Amino acid sequence: MPKTPEGWDFVISRVELNFGEFLNAIPQDSPILDVPCGVGYLEYYLLKKGFTKIHAVDLSEEQIQVAKSKLREYGHEFDGKVEFHVADAFEYLKKGHSYAAIAMIDFLEHLEKDKILEILGLSYDALQPGGFLFLRVTSADNPMWGRFFYRDFTHVTPFTPDSLHQCLRATGFEVIKVDYEVLPRICGSWIIKLKQSIRYRGLWFLGKFLGIPPQAFTEALIAVAKR
């Protein structure tokens, strides 16, 4: 969980940079599901965008309490706009609700392969025709992916762009976009900017040597798919 307002702004900017253009095309009174919702930064983003029918689901009651606390801390009134549910994602998706969009951020990598296909199938069934699915997963395309992947003991399945495409097509989705996540630039002193510049140039040269684009060194892949 982000510990500072600057850290919170950073995770919000990640959502905007990678999914904003698609979310902007969805009417603000459309039902949107965030599963699992974690500490609520997507709810913060959606409320700021004016969305009023948000379903936030997480297996952890503690996470949901933190999400409510963070929304209050940052001055967002969520009563009547966000429905929080302590529930299993698989069971909740079977309830028969219909959504204009479903977001699964940093979730699928925690599941076995058969469960990934199952929850994608359930998501497809729960989306309205033309509805969007937003995904962010850990990238195995990064040459240093093991460093990011195995630091979390609960990670199970890494993804490449090809495997993410396969999963989405196998469950009926029209794939709109699969790409490396774009990260916001961190503002700061000239020293921080110099470090960023040196890092980018270093990754550019390393990417040239390995035959991969510099963007591949990001930790995550993002995907946008449509029913």
Image (cartoon, rainbow, N blue to C red):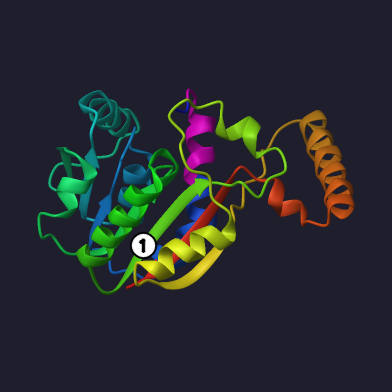
- Near mark 1 (Cα within 10 A), the count class, few <14, some 14-19 or many ≥20, is many
User: Is residue 44 at all visible to an observer of this figure?
Assistant: yes
With 83 as the anchor, is 144 left or right in this view? right
The percent coordinates of residue 26 (x first, y second) are 32, 69
Q: Amino acid at mark 1?
A: Leu
Start-end of magenta stretch: 3-12
The outermost residue toward the front is 114
Residue 88 position by quadrant: top left
Find out whether residue 70 is within the magenta segment. Answer: no
With 96 as the anchor, is 132 left or right in this view? right
Give the number of callouts. 1
- Position of the C terminus, as image quadrant, is bottom left
Seen from the viewer's position, the closer of residues 76 and 130 is 130
Above/below status of 127 relative to 54: below
- Position of the N terminus, as image quadrant, is top left
The percent coordinates of residue 72 (x first, y second) are 27, 31
Q: Main secondary structure of the magenta part?
A: helix
Seen from the viewer's position, the closer of residues 123 and 1 is 123
Q: Residue at x 86, y 46 (%)?
A: 206
Above/below status of 177 relative to 13: below
The outermost residue toward the left is 95
The percent coordinates of residue 13 (x first, y second) are 52, 47
Residue 101 position by quadrant: bottom left
Read off the residue under disc 1. Answer: 133
Q: Residue at x 50, y 27 (%)?
A: 152
User: Is residue 24 at all visible to an observer of this figure?
Assistant: no
SS under mark 1: strand
The percent coordinates of residue 109 (x first, y second) are 45, 42
Q: Residue at x 48, y 29 (%)?
A: 5
